[in-house]
Image: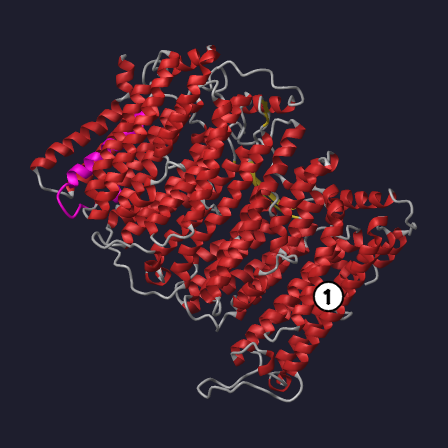
Amino acid sequence: MDTLLLVTVLLPLGGALVIGSDRRVARVSALATVLLTCVLAAILVFSYPAGDAAFAQTDVTWLGWPGSSPDSSSAIHFNIALDGLSVWMFGLTAMLMITAVLVGWEAIDQQAPLYYRLLLLLETGMLGVFVAGDIILFYVFFEFTLIPLFFLIGIWGSEARRYAAIKFFLFTLAGSVLTFLGLLAIVLWVAHDSASEVVTFSIAELTLYLTNNPMDTGLQWWLFVALFAGFAIKVPLFPLHTWLPLAHVQAPTAGSVILAGVLLKIGTYGFVRFNVAMLPDATVACMPWMLTLAVAGIVYGALVALAQTDMKRLIAYSSVSHLGFCMLGIFAVNRLGMQGGVLQMVNHGLSTGGLFALVGMLYERYHTREIADLGGLARQTPVLAFFMLVMTFSSIGVPGLNGFAGEILLLIGMFQRAWGDAPTQYVMLYRVIAVAAVSGVVLGAWYMLYLVQRVFFGPLREPKHDPKEPPVRDLSTREICALAPLCVFILWIGLQPSFFLDRISPTLDALTTPAMDIAAGAKDSNPADPPIASKPIEGNLARVD
Amino acid sequence: MSTETVCLLIPECVLIAAALAIYVAGAFIDAPKRWSWIAAGGILLAAGSLWLQGGMSVVEGPVSSDGLATFGRWLALAFGGLFVLLSSRPLSGPGTSEYVGSLLLAIAGLMLVSGASEVVLLFLGLELISIPTYILLYLGRRDSNSQEATLKYFFLSILASAMLLYGFSFLYGTTGTTDLTAMRAVAGASAGLADLSKVALVLILAGLGFKIAAVPFHFYAPDVYQGTTYTNGAILSVLPKAAGFVALARIVVAAMPGTEADGWRVVFVLAVLTMTFGNVVALWQDNLRRLLAYSSIAHAGYMLIGLAVALASRATGQPMAFGGLGAMMFYLCVYTVATIGTFAVLDYLGHRDNPVEGIDELAGLGRTRPVAAAMTAVFMFSLAGIPPLAGFQGKLSIFLSALSVEGQTAGGNLRPWFIGLAIIGVINAAIAAAYYLRIIGTMYFRTPLATPRAEGGLGSWCAAVACAVLALAIGIYPRPLVRASFAAKPAAVYTEGETDSQKLLSVDRKTWAETASPPPHLPDF
C-alpha cells in the first residue's frame, strides 16, 4: 500500500512526460493514465481503514539544511499519507479527472498534447496537496497547481482568458505567500518552543505538539490571519471571491470542473488541517468573524447567482454560496458542523463539477451560455436533461442525494452552536447567521430550479443553427461515461452517508477536538446560557441517515 | 607570500594566461571562432587545477581557501563556462579575441575576490572584474546607445570604486592593517574606533551596493542593460553581483565586528528599498532587457535580506540554523541560473544585428518556438519563486532565515523587524509574479505576430538548456547545492568548532532554549 500511494501520485506526472505528440494518441494516453490512476486511487480509498493513523505512508528525507543529518527529521521530508480528512478528496480528485479528460475530448483541437500534459500535471499537484504530510511539501503542491491551471485558462479559455488567467494566478499567489510565512512561522515557533535538536516540518508532529503545548492566543491570532490570507482566497470566502467568477467563466470546461471540484476545496482543507487543528484558540476567537463572512458569502453568492443570465456565471456564483456552507459548518466548531462541512466539500465537488461539465456540453452543442437563448431542451436532449436534474437536485440538497446529507449536518451543527453553545455576547449574531444560512438553501433551490426550468422545460427555444454543423444530438456514450460515476457517488453519499462519515470522523475528531473543547469552554465561561445537552442529539443525528 | 599562496592561485593564473594568449594571438590570427574554444579549454584547465587543490587548507596570507573561497571560485568557473557558451558566436566586427580574453579576466577577477582575505587584493579583484567589463560593454554592440551605456557604466563604476577605496582607507586607518583576519582581531579588541568604522561601513556598502545594483546605487542598471547585448546583460547581472555579495560577506560580515548593530539596520533599509523599487518599477517596463535589469535589482534586495540576517545574527551573537549567509549564497545561485538562462534564451531568439527588444515580440512564442518558450517559462516561474523550481527553494531559505532571527540587542528585540522584513519580501514576491507572468502570458496566450529569427547560435541554446535543466534539478533536489552554499562561510567568522555545521545547529538549539535569559555576550571571534 505504501508504494501504491506514491505510484498513484506520481503516475499522472509520468503520463504527462510520455504523452504522444498527436491529438488522438495524446487524449487516449491521457485517458488511460487517469483511468489507471483512478483505479489505484479507488483501491487505496476503499482499503483505507477508519482510524486516525496515517495510511500508506511514504516518508523520505527530501531536502535539508546542513546540520541536519540525512536521517534526522530536521530536514524537509517527502512525506505522503492518507488520512480521514484527505481520503475522500483524494478519491474525488482521481474520479473528477476522468470527467475532466472526457469533457474536452472533442472540444480541444488546438495544441491538444500540451493540454493533456497540463491536465495530468495538475492531477499530480492536486493529489499531492491532499496527501502531503510535510508542511513544505504541502505548500509546494499547493502552489504548483497554479501553473497548469494558469495555462489551461490562458490558452484554451474564452474571450477574456488572458486577464482571467493572470488575475487568478496573482490573486491566489498574493494570499498564499502570506500563508507560506505563516506556515514557516509555525514550524519555527515549535522548534523554538520544544528546544529540541531537530526542526520538524511534519504536519502530524506539529499538530501533536501544538495540541499539547498551545501557543498564546495573541500569536495564534496573527498566524491565523496569515494562513487565512491564502486559504480564504482559495475557498473563496466573501469578499475575496472576485477572481472566481471570472476564472470559472473563462476557463475551458475541464478547467472549471477541476477548479470547482477540487481546487477550491484546497482552501477549506487548509482551514481544517492548519487553522482549526493547529491554532484552536484563534479559531474560536475568530469564529464570529468567520461565520459572518461565510454567511455573507452564502447569501451574497445566492443573490448574485439569481441575477445571472449566463449559465456558467450562475454556477460560479453558486459555488461561492456553497463554499460558504462548507465554511459555516467548519467554523461552527462542533462535531456535526465539522462533519457536514467536510462532507459538503466532497458533495460540492461532485455536483458542481458535474454542473460545469453539463454546461460545457450544452455550449458545445449550442455555442451559447445565455439562459435566454435556450428553452425546452428536455425534448431535444432528454439524457442531458436527466443528468442536469440529478446534479441540480444534488446541488440544492434534495433528500436522498448527497447535498442533503452534508447540508443538514452542517446546518444542525450551526443551529446547535447558535441555540445551544453560543457565548452570551454572540447569541443573537449566531442565531441571525443560522437563520440567514437557511435562507441560502431556499435561494439555492430558487436559482437552480429557475435555471433548469428556463433551459430544459417550457417551449423549445434554440439559437439559430448553423447548417454546416451536424445536428444537435443527445449525450454520447463518452459524455455519459463522464457523468455517470459522479451520479453513482451522488446517490451513494445520499443514501449511506455513514459509510463516508465513518472514515472521515476519527481523523477529523482527532484534529478538531482541541478547538471544539475550547469552543465548549468559551461557552462554559458564560453560565447565563441555558445548558442544552448536545451529546444525545449528536448521537442520534450522526445516524439520521 | 608563501609557496602555498602561489599554488592556491594557480587556477587564476591559468585563466589569466589563457586570456593573455588569446589577446596576443588575436592580433596576428584572424580566426574568430577559435577563441571561445581556447577560452573553454582555459576554464576546464582552471577547473582541473582547482579540483586538484581540493585538500589544501591555507588560512594565513592574502589568499585563503575557506568555504567561501571554494564556493565562490567554483561559482566563477561555472559562470565562465556559461558565458563562454553565450559568447561563442563571433562579434560582427573585429575584436572577438579581445572580447573572449576580457571575459576570462573578469572570471579570474571573481575568483580572486572570492579567495582574497586582504583588502588590497580584494580591491584588485573587483577592479579585475570592472575594467574588462568596460571593454566587454564597448565591444558588444557599436551603436550610440551602447556607447552611452558603456560611458555611463564606466563613470559610475569609477565613482563606486573610489567610494569603496575611501571606505577601505578608513578601515586601514582604524585598524592599521589590510589583512582581514588581523583587522577583525584589532577591531574586536578596540571599541573606541567604532565611530570611524561606521563611516567605513557606509562607504563600503555604497561602493559594493553599486556592484550588486542595490537601490539607490542602481541608476546605471536599466540604461546599461537596455543599451547592450544579451550576453553582456547576463554578465552584468551576474558577475559584479556575485563579487559584491562575496565581498560583503568577507568584509562587512566577517571583518568588521562592532558595526553589526548599525550594519543590519542599514542593510535592512537597503533590502526593503531595493526589492520594492525594483519590483514596482519593473511592472511598467516594455523592453525586455530593461525589465530584466529591474528584476535583477529586485533580486539583489532578496539577497540583502540574507545579509541583514547574517549581520543581525552576528549582532545578537546567536548563530542561526537557517543562517543568513548560506541562504544568501544559495539564493545567488538560483538567481543566476534563472537569469543567465533568460538572457541566453532571449539571445538565441534574436539575431546579432536585430535582437529581441520588446515583450510584444515574444507574442505567440508558445506556438512558434515551443521549446524556447517552455524554457523561458521555466526561468520566469523560477524567478517568481513558484515551486517546484529553483527560485522557490531560494525564497524558502531566505524567508526561513529571516523568520528564525531572534534575540536582543541594545536596540530591542530584533524579531519583529525581521518578521516585517519577511512580510515585505513575500509581498514583493507576489508583485514580481505580475511582470513575470506578463511575459509568460504574452508567449502563450497571444497570437503569434512573426516567428522570431532564432539565430542566436548553438552556444546560447546550450547555455539556455543547461540553465533550464539546472533550474528544474535544483528545484526538485536542492540538497547538494544547499549544502555547498551553507558551507560557504568566511573561515574567520566560524572558527573554534563553529565551522562544523552540526555543532552550529546544536549551539543554536541551546541558545534558543535559553532565550529566557539575556544573551550572555558577543561570542569571542
| Quadrant showing the C terminus of chain A | bottom right
Q: Is A5 left, or right, of B350 in this rendering?
A: right
* Residue B107 is one of the magenta-drawn residues: yes
User: What percent of the width, then of the height, locates residue B120?
Assistant: 30, 19
- Left or right: where does residue B501 sit relative to residue B31? right
Residue B173 image point, x, y percent: 36, 14
Q: Residue A47, how many percent across, how many down?
A: 68, 53
Q: Magenta stretch: residue B363 in it?
A: no
A534 displayed left or right of A267: right
Disc 1 is placed on an element classified as: helix
Magenta stretch? B85-113
To which quarter of the image does residue B252 belong?
top left
Q: Residue at x 19, y 39 (%)?
A: B99
In front of the other: A68 or B77: B77
Kindly tell me whether residue A282 is visible in this rendering: yes
Residue B101 falls in image quadrant: top left
Residue B205 versus residue B57 in the image, above or below: below
What residue sits right under mark 1 in the picture?
Answer: A402
Q: Is residue B355 above or below residue B237?
A: below
Pointer 1 indicates a residue of which chain?
Answer: A
For image coordinates 24% across by 51% down, the residue present is B456
Secondary structure, magenta segment, majority class: helix
